[in-house]
Amino acid sequence: MKIAIVGAGPAGSLLSCYLAARGHRVDVYERRADPRRYDDAEGRSINLGLSARGVKALTDVGLMADIWPLTVPMRGRAVHGPDGKVAFHPYGNHQEEILHSISRRDLVVSLVAHAAGAGVAFHYDTQLSALPEADVVVGADGAFSTVRTLMGRGARADFRQEYLPWGYKELTIPHMPVHHEALHVWPGGDDGLIVTHPNLDGSATATLFLPYDTLAAITDPEAFFARRFPDALALIPDLAKEFAERPVGHLVSIRTAPWHHDGHVVLIGDAAHAVYPFYGQGMNSALEDCTVLDACLAEHPDHPAAAFAAFEGRRRPHTDVLDELSRQNFVELRERVRSPLHHARKRADLMLARLLPGRWVPLYTAVSHTTTPYADALARAKRQDAVLRWTAAGVAGLAVVAMFARKVR
Amino acid sequence: MKIAIVGAGPAGSLLSCYLAARGHRVDVYERRADPRRYDDAEGRSINLGLSARGVKALTDVGLMADIWPLTVPMRGRAVHGPDGKVAFHPYGNHQEEILHSISRRDLVVSLVAHAAGAGVAFHYDTQLSALPEADVVVGADGAFSTVRTLMGRGARADFRQEYLPWGYKELTIPHMPVHHEALHVWPGGDDGLIVTHPNLDGSATATLFLPYDTLAAITDPEAFFARRFPDALALIPDLAKEFAERPVGHLVSIRTAPWHHDGHVVLIGDAAHAVYPFYGQGMNSALEDCTVLDACLAEHPDHPAAAFAAFEGRRRPHTDVLDELSRQNFVELRERVRSPLHHARKRADLMLARLLPGRWVPLYTAVSHTTTPYADALARAKRQDAVLRWTAAGVAGLAVVAMFARKVR
Ligand SMILES: Cc1cc2nc3c(=O)[nH]c(=O)nc-3n(C[C@H](O)[C@H](O)[C@H](O)COP(=O)(O)OP(=O)(O)OC[C@H]3O[C@@H](n4cnc5c(N)ncnc54)[C@H](O)[C@@H]3O)c2cc1C
Ligand SMILES: Cc1cc2nc3c(=O)[nH]c(=O)nc-3n(C[C@H](O)[C@H](O)[C@H](O)COP(=O)(O)OP(=O)(O)OC[C@H]3O[C@@H](n4cnc5c(N)ncnc54)[C@H](O)[C@@H]3O)c2cc1C
């Protein structure tokens, strides 16, 4: 089959590797410049947290060996308190339960190099505004997918696009003094949030998330940091300059249906399901899409329409759940103070996971450190929550009974 | 101010009357032909239920006197059972609590004639694909608004579009033998639904709503009717022909935000908030928009941006609620059988409305027969529901107490 992929981001580049391995003729069209030829196509370094699902998708096509050296392990979350104290929370009970920070450009260059070696043709500086000629067109062109717009023209399509009223800016931490191998978080409540990912050279990229109103009101970023995130201020020497120069990024959640049209066009990655970035699963789910779509195409080699329907049927329920989870984790990440009950629940959850390895899996673990489909992970977490609630009620009930028993005696 | 309105449906035509009355220079652009010159621009008669909100909006600009003669009262709902029996349920306890069936074309022609008399310029056969030149552009161009697309370009906008998996066809009942002054319903459960509105000439227009799968599977419409809606079959002599010739209509719900841009563009009616038609409030809320927007423009005569922000702030919470209510009423209308509890509640609700006139207002009454803003109507209904539930619990509790009291005695 002649397959055209629009977009050479993580999803489009990885899918081209899968399809080339099946012997298809693949062309990839990308509006940006070739990242192999330009040192810093973005003018800045974007890095992302790679987790179990992404690792699995890259492993399945034999690429992970090349990619490991490009990653920095993140062994846990380093939470910066308002008092400047840093609390380190490991991601899991096991050695393998960690995340991996990788630069978007390093990842994509590695995928593109592999795909090009397998015969995939990449066409850079090519922004498509009409569907290319091919047996199958894959829209891997991100949240504002042109392929999605062209495909849906005239047909009934459900669609939901929602912006978070928060924007973000990327800032540079040249040297992270403590816990380099961690994801750092400055939870700022309703006033903002900083998250950092480490880079190979010992630096880290900080993403400052702020409500638009707050962002618009900042005239002196250093004064703002001194007030809200004093210990982060010291880490970002170029704050004023970067704050002024870097664009504001927007955060959008997108759901759309159907994901395919007429056995000819199909969407993957952010084009099909963009989520808020607070669970760190956008790229991971985009990479996972490639494995599922590849399997569906292999199951229906002569019937793309059936393959695409199977892909959407198998995948959309899970990415819908991921959308919900990503919204909820926004609250989780930015909350500064929390009820003792919440802490007790979290601790019980982790303790049970240690006591019942493989049989009790906290939600965060299932999402980030396993490849259990998202909806199944959520369903399991709900069952576990019910057990915790009943147990708590049971313990309280026993205490009451004991009290009565004492009185009676 | 020079104001351009895109779309001469119910919303655009009525708004032009309001704005002309305030002395603005108004141009209206409409892609269809002038309905005053062509007898049947649509090739078919579409009629709609006008209720209190629409009546109020038309009255406020002095138009209702011209429109009353074009309407047929609908005094209640005539529900056709599977056995062919027809049960008539009056819409309310009062003489005024009725709906009014009106042909879309008659309504629009009346509004356009009035507006043209007041100096509004109508440009027919003019489909806009760019914003027209004007101080203010009003997008009254319906659910698939071009103005909305142009206005949102590049800016952050929340958007949700959802198709019901049901389509519809309009069919003709030349003569309705019983209850001409009623809205007839054939509740078909999950298999379909027929709703009819009366016309001035004694005929009625039937709208057949069906799941797409059912619709696609019908090869012989008469056989289908004989099976599902036997007593409706006899009323539609041209069934086979009309079923084959009439297009399938789609049902879409749309929410979007913001409704305005830069003090220059604003959306009203279906362009801002399209709902499923099962509460019969789409046009009524579109007409109500005109009153609210007119009031906001009058409050901020020199500051359209403030007027539009006030309009959206005052209006969107209510049309969001209407969207919910319209979804729920789909279930209400098509359900064939219902629990005795539901019936008991409904009866209690109506009885209390009779006992406490003006103080107890059932939800349907508040939505259809008053101009209480939709969200306020819903909030009141929720309070009333709570009272009903507590009362029921209280009665049950008293019964238990009485039982114990007997035993003890
Ligand atoms: C602040 C932030 C932090 C994030 N952190 C994480 C994280 O830690 N972990 C994680 O898993 N995910 C994260 N994500 C999400 C992740 O970035 C995305 O989910 C991922 O990039 C999606 O990959 P994609 O290939 O589907 O789309 P994209 O990465 O958007 O790639 C689409 C490509 O298509 C190209 N394109 C678009 N239109 C056209 C056109 N018309 N013609 C030709 N080419 C076109 C674009 O130039 C682009 O290269 C984060 C996102 C944000 C915003
Ligand atoms: C089956 C059905 C039954 C319904 N029953 C009821 C009911 O009983 N009661 C009720 O209140 N509502 C009912 N409605 C809803 C009602 O029809 C709509 O809410 C109402 O028509 C909205 O009015 P509008 O003026 O905002 O948009 P529309 O009526 O859609 O008018 C938009 C106008 O803009 C024009 N236009 C579009 N694009 C352009 C362009 N680019 N350039 C120029 N002109 C353009 C169109 O030709 C059209 O004339 C029903 C709807 C359906 C589908």
Image (cartoon, coloured by chain):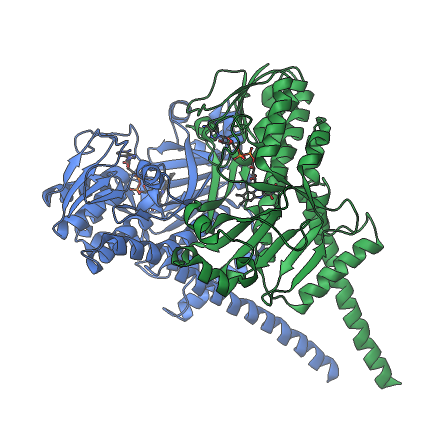
Chain colours: A blue, B green
Image point (57%, 61%), residue name: B231
Say above or below: B10 vs A332: above
Which quarter shows the N terminus of chain B? top right
Say above or below: A6 vs B244: above
Residue B285 visible in this rendered orientation of the protein: yes
Q: Position of residue B302 (x, y in %)?
A: 63, 15
Residue B317 visible in this rendered orientation of the protein: no
Say above or below: B406 vs A47: below
> In the displayed structure, does residue A130 sit left or right of residue A234?
left
Which quarter shows the C terminus of chain B? bottom right
Residue B280 picture quarter: top right
Q: Position of residue A31 (x, y in %)?
A: 25, 31
Looking at this rendering, what residue extends furthest in the right direction? Answer: B409
| Near-viewer residue (B163 or A93) | B163
| Near-viewer residue (B235 or A132) | B235
Image point (74%, 80%), residue name: A407
Image point (18%, 53%), residue name: A61
Q: Position of residue B37 (x, y in %)?
A: 53, 25
Residue B80 picture quarter: bottom right
Quarter of the rendered structure image containing ligand 1: top left
